[in-house]
Image (cartoon, rainbow, N blue to C red):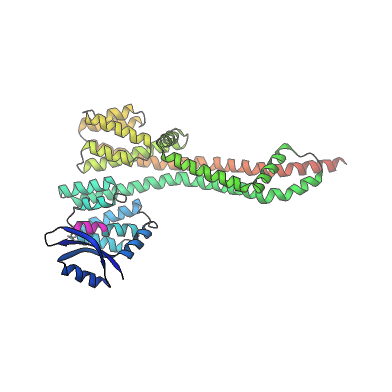
């Protein structure tokens, strides 16, 4: 017999939770009615179990999808539709199953009397802190549509930043993987075919050829050791990257790298300026805005710099002063903030900074890809060329010996 889980309200308004063994949902509903309970939710426990299992396979909504959600929210709300109906419409039409489920859960919480921001806090892994804070500010000021419009712009800009970063990293990473595969194929399948021929030459092989044949034999004999070492190395790097020391080390490296460092700094500046501007424009207090902005930073050093700046702002100092002392942000950031603070237009200055660094990130990405392409080609040519030369050297010596006969 199916087991139904229910959340209901009694005649005194108190919530009741429990399970019912019943042949159907209709019978379970009748049982609740007879016990003077009004069902809020009534679902098959087996369905809940299946839903929990499916959550592992759900794809989290991307920034682009969240931007579309915000735009749709604005369009529907501006047509005079209430929140409950808006959430229902959005849940039915979104293609992302994870987002659809979260929207239904948000609607349920609102139906129970929660504010929209409060309902969103149930799924803080999907709704970011900045999203919830902006919605809360919109509800408090009666300008929910404006908040969603600003969040749509925020998500769109963030998606563009992420796309530029992916362009800068995916291309060299792909070529590196191709290089590794090519070398592995040469060592495992190509070099061994020449080894017997080299033995028949009955001559001393060049050191380079001996080294390459040794590497090939090692790969063929101990391939499982090679794969195990690679797997252990990946696991070690992933775990180290999650630790405090690992985050600080990787953060410092990404800032100092000759080509990627400049892109990392500009991306961090663009994200900081855009997020802070969005929050301040919505009436969020400066200290809270800095705290939320720090949470959005992917590089731990920029995050720590903003958290330190928050402490100084709380003591009455201007934001530009700790930003300058951090020595992480370019001087332009400090000067623009200082001008905004002195004129009372810090929001506008932050918006201009964000627009400037968005363009700088695009240019830096193009420059990085233009510089990386020939470098990677040269490296790949060097690796493959070394293997080819190791094969050709003994053959050249053989032809030379034949000419001398």
When the figure is inspected, residue 288 is found, relative to residue 136, above or below; the finding is above
In the figure, residue 332 lies in which quadrant?
A: top left
In the figure, residue 249 lies in which quadrant?
A: top left
When the figure is inspected, residue 206 is found, relative to residue 222, above or below; the finding is above
Give yes or no for residue 113 being in the magenta stretch: yes
Give yes or no for residue 110 being in the magenta stretch: yes
Q: What secondary structure prevails in the magenta region?
A: helix
Instruction: Locate residue 229 relative to residue 319 in the image: left or right.
Output: right
**In this orientation, which residue lies closer to the viewer: 154 or 61?**
61
Instruction: Locate residue 19 relative to residue 238 in the image: left or right.
Output: left
**Residue located at (73% from left, 44% from top):** 392
In the image, the segment drawn in magenta is: 105-114
In the figure, residue 4 lies in which quadrant?
A: bottom left
**In this orientation, which residue lies closer to the viewer: 321 or 248?**
248
- Quadrant, the C terminus: top right
**Residue located at (28% from left, 61% from top):** 91
**In this orientation, which residue lies closer to the viewer: 38 or 20?**
20
Q: Is residue 69 visible?
A: yes
Instruction: Locate residue 234 relative to residue 71 in the image: left or right.
Output: right
In the rendered image, residue 174, in percent from the top left (x then y), is placed at 52, 48
In the rendered image, residue 404, in percent from the top left (x then y), is placed at 86, 40
């Amino acid at each position: 017999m199916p087991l139904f889980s229910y959340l209901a309200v009694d005649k005194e308004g108190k919530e009741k939770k429990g399970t019912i063994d019943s042949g159907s949902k209709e019978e379970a509903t009748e049982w609740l009615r007879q016990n003077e309970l009004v069902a809020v939710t009534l679902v098959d426990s087996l369905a809940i179990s299946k839903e929990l299992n499916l959550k592992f396979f759900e794809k989290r909504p991307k920034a682009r999808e969240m931007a579309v959600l915000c735009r749709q929210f604005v369009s529907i709300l501006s047509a005079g539709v209430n929140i409950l109906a808006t959430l229902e419409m959005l849940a039915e039409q979104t293609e992302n199953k994870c987002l659809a489920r979260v929207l239904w859960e948000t609607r349920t919480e609102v139906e129970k009397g929660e504010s929209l921001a409060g309902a969103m806090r149930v799924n803080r892994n999907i709704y970011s802190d900045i999203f919830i804070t902006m919605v809360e500010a919109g509800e408090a000021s009666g300008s929910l549509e404006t908040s969603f419009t600003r969040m749509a712009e925020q998500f769109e800009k963030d998606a563009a930043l992420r796309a530029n970063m992916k362009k800068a990293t995916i291309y060299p990473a792909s070529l590196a993987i191709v290089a590794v595969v090519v070398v592995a194929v040469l060592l495992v399948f190509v070099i061994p075919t020449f080894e017997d021929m080299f033995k028949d030459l009955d001559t001393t092989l060049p050191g380079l050829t001996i080294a390459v044949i040794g590497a090939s034999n090692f790969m063929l004999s101990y391939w499982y050791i090679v794969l195990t070492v690679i797997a252990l190395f990946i696991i070690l790097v992933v775990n180290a990257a999650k630790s405090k020391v690992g985050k600080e080390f990787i953060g410092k490296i990404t800032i100092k790298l000759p080509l990627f460092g400049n892109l990392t700094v500009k991306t961090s500046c663009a994200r900081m300026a855009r997020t802070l501007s969005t929050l301040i424009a919505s009436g969020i207090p400066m200290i809270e805005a800095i705290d939320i902005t720090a949470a959005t930073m992917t590089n731990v050093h920029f995050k720590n710099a903003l958290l330190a700046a928050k402490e100084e702002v709380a003591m009455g100092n201007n934001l530009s002063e700790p930003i300058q002392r951090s020595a992480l942000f370019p001087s332009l950031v400090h000067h623009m903030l200082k001008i905004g603070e002195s004129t009372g237009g810090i929001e506008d200055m932050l918006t201009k900074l964000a627009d400037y660094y968005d363009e700088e990130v695009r240019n830096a990405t193009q420059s990085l890809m233009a510089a990386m392409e020939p470098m990677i080609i040269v490296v790949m040519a060097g690796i493959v060329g070394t293997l080819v030369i190791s094969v050709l050297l003994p053959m050249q010596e053989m032809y030379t010996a034949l000419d001398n006969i």
